[in-house]
Amino acid sequence: MPVLIAIILQKDNHGGLSLHRHSSFIGLFQQPPQGGSEFLLCPVGFDPPPRSAPVSDTMDFDERASRQAEVMYLTRDLTEVRRRTIEALGLTPGMRVLDVGSGPGLFADEMAQTVGPTGCVRGVDISESMIGLARTRCADKPWVDFQIADAVSLPFEDEYFDACVSVQTLEFVADVDAALREIHRVLKPGGRLAVSDADWGATSWRCEDAALCERVMNGWLQGFAHLRLPLTLKSSIEAAGFVDVSARAIPVLNTACEPESFSFQFIRQLQGVVPARTDLTQEEVDAWASELRGLDERGAYFFSQTRYLFTADKPL
Ligand SMILES: C[S@@+](CC[C@H](N)C(=O)[O-])C[C@H]1O[C@@H](n2cnc3c(N)ncnc32)[C@H](O)[C@@H]1O
């Protein structure tokens, strides 16, 4: 069975190894024994894709992208990430909690049920449409409030919160160290932090047309400030002044492309946003999506990505 492994490594900005600029994926391309056109694409590291526009600090979550993201966050895979992240905070009634990058308010809503009206939940996000969805979701809980603010400049006094969560947000923030310093500032001594992000450089997705798959993913990743943030998060959290940092992996593994799975909804998200961000047409992105659904119909679908959850404490 012919197997080609092509690896060109270089040091990235964070001291880790990444792919050389001219080969976006480290791929293991394996031809099936019966011949045919299928390839197993296992990217295990890649450089940020070339950017067609100036690097922004974030992805633009407009009204449509925010609604589709909300559906994605409600899948069973991300519900499990949320459950484990909130559990790690050890919340109790009466606590004050902050959500940095609160998105459509799913974390805030769940945390509000535990801290109750004697506590409070505050969410900040830079997307107006996300803030709108979050306010609607939590309208029945007056102890929850959201405001538009940047993670690097939090509109709260020092030592106000007992706990802070930030999920899939720091990967969009250019100055992660500044955001972590701000979170440290607004936490009380002994306050707890939970941060979770994905390693986008280690997403495994079986595709027939590997080149098209790569173009679609690179289109999505244009909006990110950091593609491999978990690799450097422990050092950044410690540098911000936190102690007792611990990390755990939360796998998102789909061997079928079902509507309740993360990758099913992620495909829809990519169909919605990638044509607007790249030179790919809607037809090309739709063809990529149909190809993945075709793999699923043949029982040959595979998607895997790891989320990393870091917890830490502000010293007493
Ligand atoms: C992938 S969503 C995650 C939402 C939410 N944390 C969740 O997991 O359900 C990322 C969110 O971070 C927000 N965001 C991106 N950059 C930000 C920044 N610099 N400050 C605050 N929020 C930011 C985005 O607008 C978006 O709502």
Image (cartoon, rainbow, N blue to C red):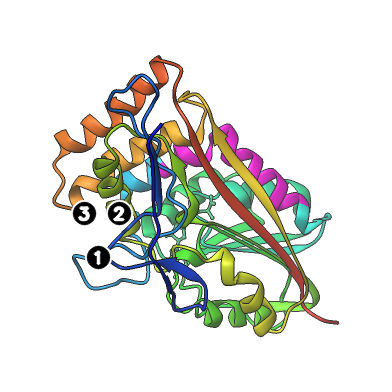
Q: Position of residue 116 (x, y in %)?
A: 76, 51
- Residue drawn where x is 25% and y is 65% of the image: 50
Q: Position of residue 121 (x, y in %)?
A: 66, 60
Vertical placement of residue 68 versus 291, above or below: below
Q: Give the image quarter of residue 252.
A: top right
Q: Position of residue 304 (x, y in %)?
A: 52, 40
Residue 50 numbered mark, or none? 1
Distance between the alpha carbons at the discs numbered 2 and 3 = 10 Å
12 magenta-colored: no
Locate residue 210 relative to residue 143 in the image: left or right: left
Name the residue that disc number 2 marks: 218
Distance between the alpha carbons at the discs numbered 1 and 3 = 12 Å
- Residue drawn where x is 41% and y is 21% of the image: 296
Amino acid type of the residue that numbered disc 3 sits on in the rendered structure: Arg
Whether the residues at callouts 2 and 1 have beta carbons within 8 Å, the answer is yes
- Residue drawn where x is 41% and y is 65% of the image: 126
Q: Position of residue 158 (x, y in %)?
A: 68, 84
In this view, the residue farthest toward the front is 1
Amino acid type of the residue that numbered disc 2 sits on in the rendered structure: Asn
> Could you tell me which secondary element the residue under label 1 belongs to?
loop
Name the residue that disc number 3 marks: 277
Which numbered disc flags the more N-terminal residue, 1 or 3? 1
Amino acid type of the residue that numbered disc 1 sits on in the rendered structure: Pro
Residue 10 can be seen in this image: yes
User: Is disc 2 surrounded by few (<14), some (14 to 19) or many (20+) residues within 10 Å?
Assistant: many
- Quadrant placement of the N terminus: top left
Vertical placement of residue 135 versus 53, above or below: above
| Magenta stretch prevailing secondary structure | helix
Which stretch is magenta? 69-87
- Quadrant placement of the C terminus: bottom right
